[in-house]
Image (spheres, helix red, strand yellow):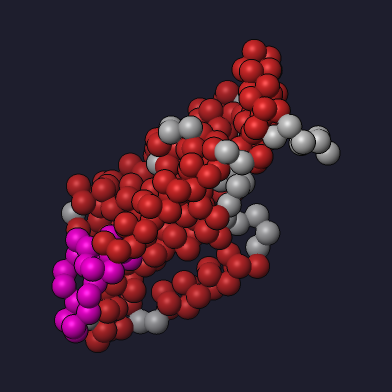
Amino acid sequence: MKQRITPAAMGYIIINIVAFLAMFITDPALSADTLIDFGAKANFQIADGKLWYLITPIFLHGSLMHLLFNSMAIYFFAPYVELFFGTKKFILISLGTGIFSTLGSFLFSNAISLGASGVIYGYLAFHVYLFLLNRELYLQTFGREVFILIGFNVVYSLVAGNIDLAGHLFGFVGGLAIYFLFGRKLPRMFPQRALAIAFIILMLAGGAFRAYAYRHSEDYYVKKLYYFYLKQDVENYLLLEKEFLREFPAFKAP
């Protein structure tokens, strides 16, 4: 199939480039506090109710190579989703997939994370949906190469040390859930919409529980104190330190 870029897919790439340039101009070292200020996923921000941190990470990248690889992936895989669903739905699908990706990372990882990879995994999941929709037509059009690529990426995510595995996997499953919910009905008897709704409910409930639990964890205080330290925000650092020592009087700094 002849490849061509679509308007929203190109817009996504441009936003990522502009965001990266803005971060780099602000801080060429791309320090942790700069990444968080621009919207990288930091669990303490989400636990504090700053829910826009579920979306902003999908527009940010931590290096030029990170940006280039993800831009190439968006170029190759996003247009198929946009052409199938239309531009408006594509934008909503991308944002929804990004939320699930970041939420999955929030649930299972305490690390700072950023990048479009979770959304890209959602674009890869679109091929699974197309395959289930019409297996014969899909194989005639795309062959099996995309599934080999998906398998390679899953293995890479499992073995690479600096990859947000949860963000990737939940981007994939979240994207598939969105296609099940808003896409065409699969030809076989399959409770696709019920599964999608159940997934969304579980993710929202899990996110709410995680936010409450994390807000009262040691990691919440340690990560937030470190952020204030990097920002040289003495006033907020001291206030949070007092709260931390009240919550964990037996804590000893390593």
Residue positioned 60% across, 67% down in the render? 158
Q: Which one is in front, 166 or 140? A: 166
Residue positioned 36% across, 44% down in the render? 12
Magenta-drawn segment: 175-196
Q: Which one is in front, 58 or 111? A: 111
- Residue 235 lies, with reference to residue 152, above or below; the image says above
Residue positioned 49% across, 48% down in the render? 210
- Residue 99 lies, with reference to residue 53, above or below; the image says below
**Left or right of 67 in this view: 235:** right
**Left or right of 225 in this view: 50:** left
- Residue at the limit of the structure toward the bottom, as seen here: 136
Residue 3 makes an appearance in the image: no
**Left or right of 220 in this view: 103:** left
Quadrant (top left/top right/bottom left/bottom right) for the N terminus: bottom left
Could you say where residue 30 lies in the image, as x and y percent from the top left? Answer: 63, 33
Residue 243 makes an appearance in the image: yes
Q: Which one is in front, 152 or 201? A: 201
Could you say which quadrant of the image residue 183 lies in?
bottom left
- Residue at the limit of the structure toward the right, as seen here: 254
Quadrant (top left/top right/bottom left/bottom right) for the C terminus: top right
Could you say where residue 103 lies in the image, as x and y percent from the top left? Answer: 44, 50
Residue positioned 48% across, 43% down in the render? 211
Could you say which quadrant of the image residue 133 lies in?
bottom left
Could you say where residue 164 lies in the image, as x and y percent from the top left? Answer: 57, 55
- Residue 164 lies, with reference to residue 248, above or below; the image says below
Could you say which quadrant of the image residue 63 lies in?
top right
Could you say where residue 120 lies in the image, as x and y percent from the top left? Answer: 42, 57
- Residue at the limit of the structure toward the top, as seen here: 235
